[in-house]
Amino acid sequence: MSDPLSTVFAALADPTRRAILSMLLEDDMAVTDVAAPFEMSLAAISKHLTVLAEAGLISREKRGRVIWCKLDPDALKEASVWMQGFGQFDPVDLDDFERFLLVELRDDAAPDDTAEPRSDLQEI
Amino acid sequence: MSDPLSTVFAALADPTRRAILSMLLEDDMAVTDVAAPFEMSLAAISKHLTVLAEAGLISREKRGRVIWCKLDPDALKEASVWMQGFGQFDPVDLDDFERFLLVELRDDAAPDDTAEPRSDLQEI
DNA sequence: TCTTTATTCAACCGATTGGTTGATTGTGGC
DNA sequence: GCCACAATCAACCAATCGGTTGAATAAAGA
């Protein structure tokens, strides 16, 4: 892996991590609070946070005995610029974003996230 | 994995696959021609193309005995919209994109792509 | 028809990923 | 000083990933 862009995309390629980013979009959070809505162990969430931090997507700051996680969206800019070059998309539509955020939170952050087979899309 | 957004991001999280997308940005290409600049085997490139196709990023069409690969940027829109929500980025700067494309092609598509350790970025 | 070319398939491999559990470290409150 | 809590570490696991090689399939050209 190793290059920054790959690291960012790999970090985003996991629904749990994207759900964490969505949560942090609303407010900074302690690790324990980030982990609360998920079914997996705290250690697993801690690992996810490390992945996000290494990608530069979040930063962690220790204050007392709790570590605060905060969104750090600069790393997304590079990746976003890369993507935008491919489809001449319309300027950002915030309503679109809200809709996708809702879909994300419903599909991914929910504990009973069932794996759909995706038998479509295969074109050849 | 399984959800579309994860599939797209995972497909983008590989420098070879991004280099392929960059190549297809200029023109449609046959599989053999896609594979030419890379050092890896044709079978490996074929697998990468399958990953890109399953993510919806490209489509493949058989014409005679050669399979033509063509960029299909719609799948990027969803992911792009998701990303844009995090940093209120400036409207797309095509010059920025050109610059990143060059960096990509130099760093990733080159056969002597050395893995840099990335000892930075770790904040905690 | 025979050969060449284009592409994928199948089996295999080592490395990485995403999770677990249990032990460990560091801090705050009593 | 203790105990409880916050978070990570360490070891382990099964599954997936990114590559290889060699065989198979399919179409074009002589």
Image (cartoon, coloured by chain):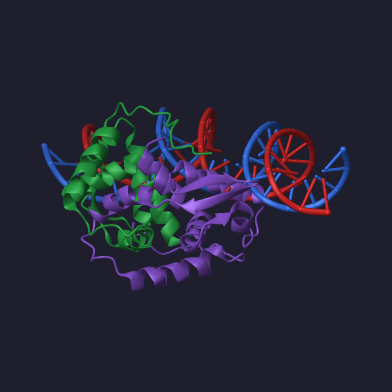
Chain colours: A green, B purple, C blue, D red
Image vertical order of residue A99 relative to residue B110, above or below: above
Q: Is residue A13 shown left or right of residue D22?
A: left
The total of numbered circles placed on residues is 0
Residue B29's image quarter? bottom right
Left or right, residue B40 beside residue B115: right
The image quarter in which residue B30 lies: bottom right
Regarding residue A102, the answer to whether it shows in the image is yes
- The quarter in which the C terminus of chain A is drawn is top right
Residue for point 44% across, 43% down: B55
Residue positioned 27% across, 35% down in the render: A109
Q: Is residue A14 visible?
A: no
Residue B85's spot in the image, x, y percent?
22, 53
Residue A79 percent across, percent down from the top left: 36, 59
Q: Quadrant of residue D1?
A: top left
Q: Residue at 44% x, 56% y: name it.
A: A6
Comparing A11 with B81, the one in front is: B81
Position in image of residue B8 (x %, y %) = 40, 46
Residue A33 locus on image (x, y percent): 21, 40
The residue nearer to you, when weighing D12 against D10, is D12
Q: A43 and D18: which one is in front?
A: D18
Q: Residue at x 52, y 57 (%)?
A: B28
